[in-house]
Amino acid sequence: MIGRSLTGRAVLAAAIAIVVALVVVGVGVDLLVSRHLHASLDGSLRDRATEVARLSATAPALLTVPGSLDAPLGGEQSSVQVLDRRGRIVARSLSLGGRVLQLGADGRHVAESGTSRFVDLRLGQDRVRAYLAPLPATGGVAGGGVVAVAASTDGVEDTLRSVRLFVVGGAVVAAAVAALALALLMRRALGPLGRLTTAAAEIEETGDARRRLPVPESGDELARLAATLNGMLAALEHAQERERRFVADASHELRTPLTALSGNVAFLAQHGASDEVVAELEHDTRRLAALADDLLALSREEAAAPPSDVVRLDELARGADGADEVVAEPAAVLGDRAALERALGNLVENARRHGAGRVTVESRTQDGVATLSVGDEGKGLPHPEAELAFGRFWRGGGARAGGSGLGLAIVRATAERHGGRAYADGARFTIELPALPLRELSEPAATTNGEEQPKGTP
């Protein structure tokens, strides 16, 4: 429906545009042709009147000879009528027959003023164009009179009608041909769009993001649109798969503490409370609370808007709890301070729990990139595991006990929300973010030079 509507509007617009353009051109052509034909007719009338005036001056007796005033005018027969100074007819061309050119006041004005003029007259049922010119006073009986040369304007009007008919017919034919050609082109061009619409409607109906739209082979904007939409569907499919895995992993993670809680509650109901059971209940409750907090934090990070506050990473490094050594070079980013503090805390906790030796926190800026990293003296992760470490509920194949498995996933989500990334290199875990200019960061860097410092001190 959209394609047909678009095609109809395009065809109608093209037809109207062509008709309007040809009408404008036709009006211009009509004016030019009309001016040219009338000017040509007026010139012929003037030349013929000049010949009659010359004949009246040189051989006035010939004026009254039958047929002497008959001569073709531009392929058409002209009508000539000669009046004396009193307005009486002295001579006439045979083409007039029994008709008379009624000059009236125009004839008297030309005779009295001695100036010629063009007038439009009626000769019977015909419309004629006439040129009135004064005759020399020495021209015999017609001396001081007027000569009127007239010709029908039917030829001019017929030519103009033919031009107008040609323009109108050409406009209609051109509009019809253009509309048909455009309709065929639009049908061919919008055919793939119709298929895209049908495929998209099927995907909408089924909700299956694994399906793809057909990509036209034309390589034009429509093909690029289809490829872009397929990329969007692929991203949506990936997001849905991630959500399915997340729900499955979260259900699996929640099952263990919930099962333990259920067993302990059943034991309490049957045997009463004991210090060991109460301790296990407290442990399972804390584990559930921590898991719920991490799930909420991860969900908020993935749904939050990009941050816009200025955050000093060197200040976060100095305030990190659990760090044995701090190397805080000036670094600033546009960020969410609370989220970055949590991400840094997760990295420090990860190093404390799974690393070895001293824990070092560093902030640096280089080539427009600000980094906040945490390292320890352990052997770190091998390359394959370093690629997987920031996944949800990843625990290194179960080799590392404790934690919800979401700490590094939260770090990655925070880094990506800030327009950066998080990665691991051996025993060093780094958050890399776009840096702000350091021109206004005048606070000197603080380095411990290998000496252990109290928590939170620069």
Image (cartoon, rainbow, N blue to C red):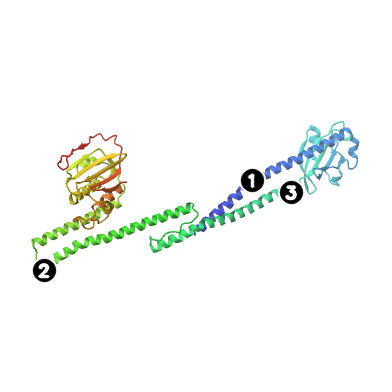
Q: Residue 96, position in %: x, y?
A: 84, 45
Q: Which of marks 3 and 2 is nearer the N terminus?
A: 3
Q: Earlier in the sequence, mark 1 or mark 3?
A: 1
Tags 2 and 1 in contact by the CB under 8 Å rule? Answer: no
State whether residue 105 appears in this view: no
Q: Which amino acid does label 2 sit on?
A: Gln
Q: How crowded is mark 2: few (under 14 residues within 10 Å), some or many (20 or more)?
A: few
> In the rendered view, does 251 fall on the left or right side of 95?
left
* Residue found farthest to the top: 138
Q: Which of marks 2 and 1 is nearer the N terminus?
A: 1
Q: Distance between the residues labelled 2 and 1?
A: 103 Å
Label 3: element kind? helix
Q: Nearer the viewer, residue 294 or 387?
A: 387
Q: Which amino acid does label 3 sit on?
A: Asp
Label 2: element kind? helix
Which label lies toward us, 1 or 3? Answer: 1
Pointer 3 residue: 158
Tags 3 and 2 in contact by the CB under 8 Å rule? Answer: no
Quadrant of the image occupied by residue 437: top left
Tags 1 and 3 in contact by the CB under 8 Å rule? Answer: no
Q: In which quarter of the image is the C terminus?
A: top left
Relative to 54, say whether 303 is above or below.
Answer: below
Pointer 1 residue: 25
Pointer 2 residue: 270
Q: Residue 406, position in %: x, y?
A: 24, 54
Label 1: element kind? helix
> In the rendered view, does 215 fall on the left or right side of 434?
right
